[in-house]
């Protein structure tokens, strides 16, 4: 874990602060003494921040600005005075049109870069995704592997990465982080992990359509620690692209077995089985595991939470036993 350092009166802007990773990042930033500003589009998404304001050690130590990432003037206003910007906002994987992904992930990133340039922001940490690699070789992929994601989501993130690289070429400071599959407490989006935990909260039988795809999974606090290290590491040069991953591959079947082990730690008498469906689904990407060697060296960081422990914490939070 990153050791808090004095960031008193340092203005930090977080786009996408109401999302899963953003919420955990904001919560972690407050002990650093920074002036945390969260830019969010939807006022209804600020409920968790009201809960955060009820925590004595965090109450009143952050503020919210409502604005659309596609509104360039609003983003420029939000970045005024910021010394560090974490750009997490965007459209995640799943369904959507070319226009929807391009607007959120390409135009939105362009507006953030415009805002950072306008205010000479000292550090920009851009969150991309390991999905840019597409269907990788049967070994952990390092950052030299050429991006070739075939989904609209991956294509939009590849384009956004190119914009960040062009921004760095102007003499500005930015790095790109490519996290693998992030999971942890309070995750609401539908992923294979949340699907597993939802089923385990309701039944003793897990039903899965595709058991063979292999991914690596990174616990949310480990991902947050990497973001903080990127912001605080004084000797990190601009322009780096770093995988934020566990470096270990797990098939969906192995993930399910790990989730069962995690649940049985919390509920020792549970007996759960995995039942594949008769016609398993195909997967657009069969194997994607990322090498984290470069991030370990550049950030002085390493993932600390193993999969079963992380799943146990996620399940306990889901059923109110955290």
Image: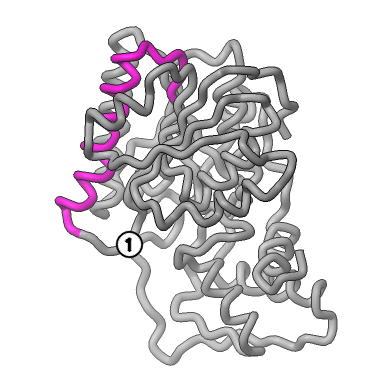
What's the residue at 29%, 33% (across, down)? 109
Query: Relative to residue 113, is residue 65 drawn left or right?
Result: right
Numbered-mark total: 1
* Crowd around label 1: few <14 · some 14–19 · many ≥20 (10 Å): few
Picture colour scheme: one colour
Q: Is residue 107 magenta?
A: yes
Image position of 286 (left or right of 9): left
Q: Is 179 or 70 nearer to us in this picture?
A: 70
Decide which of 297, 309 is in the foreground and name it: 309
- Location of mark 1 (residue): 94
**Taking the image as drawn, is residue 241 in sight?**
no
Indicate the position of residue 139 as horizontal and vertical percent values: 51, 47
The residue at 55%/60% (across/down) is 187
Percent x, y of residue 279: 38, 88
The range drawn in magenta is 97-124
Q: Residue at x 65, y 45 (%)?
A: 221
On-image quarter of the C terminus: bottom right
Mark 1 residue element: loop
Q: Reply above or below: 158 against 166.
A: below
Q: Position of residue 145 (x, y in %)?
A: 39, 36
Question: Of helix, strand and loop, which mostly describes the magenta segment?
Answer: helix
Toward the bottom, the furthest residue is 278
Q: Quadrant of the N terminus?
A: top right
């Amino acid at each position: 874990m990153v050791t808090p350092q004095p960031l008193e009166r340092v203005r930090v802007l977080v786009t996408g602060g109401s999302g899963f990773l953003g919420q955990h990042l904001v919560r972690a930033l407050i002990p650093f003494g920074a002036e945390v500003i969260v830019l969010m589009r939807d006022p209804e998404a600020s409920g968790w921040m009201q809960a955060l304001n009820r925590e004595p050690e965090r109450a009143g130590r952050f503020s919210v600005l409502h604005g659309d990432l596609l509104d360039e003037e609003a983003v420029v206003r939000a970045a005024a005075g910021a010394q560090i910007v974490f750009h997490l906002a965007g459209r995640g994987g799943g369904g959507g049109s070319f226009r929807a992904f391009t607007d959120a992930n390409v135009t939105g990133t362009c507006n953030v870069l415009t805002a950072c340039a306008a205010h000479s922001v000292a550090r920009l940490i851009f969150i991309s995704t390991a999905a840019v690699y597409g269907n990788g070789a049967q070994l952990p992929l390092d950052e030299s592997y050429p991006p070739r994601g075939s989904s609209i989501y991956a294509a939009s993130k590849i384009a956004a990465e190119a914009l960040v690289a062009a921004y760095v070429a102007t003499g500005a400071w930015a790095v790109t982080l490519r996290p693998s599959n992030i999971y942890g407490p309070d995750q609401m989006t539908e992923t294979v992990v949340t699907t597993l935990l939802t089923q385990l909260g309701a039944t003793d039988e897990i039903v899965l359509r595709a058991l063979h795809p292999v991914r690596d999974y990174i616990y949310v606090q480990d991902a947050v620690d990497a973001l903080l290290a990127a912001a605080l590491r004084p000797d990190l040069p601009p322009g780096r692209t770093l995988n934020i991953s566990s470096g270990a591959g797990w098939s969906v079947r192995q993930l399910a077995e790990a989730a069962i082990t995690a649940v049985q730690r919390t509920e020792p008498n549970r007996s759960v089985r995995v039942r594949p469906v008769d016609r398993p689904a195909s997967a657009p990407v069969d194997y994607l595991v990322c090498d984290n060697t470069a991030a370990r060296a550049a950030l002085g960081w390493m993932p600390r939470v193993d999969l079963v422990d992380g799943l146990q914490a996620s399940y306990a939070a889901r059923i109110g036993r955290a």
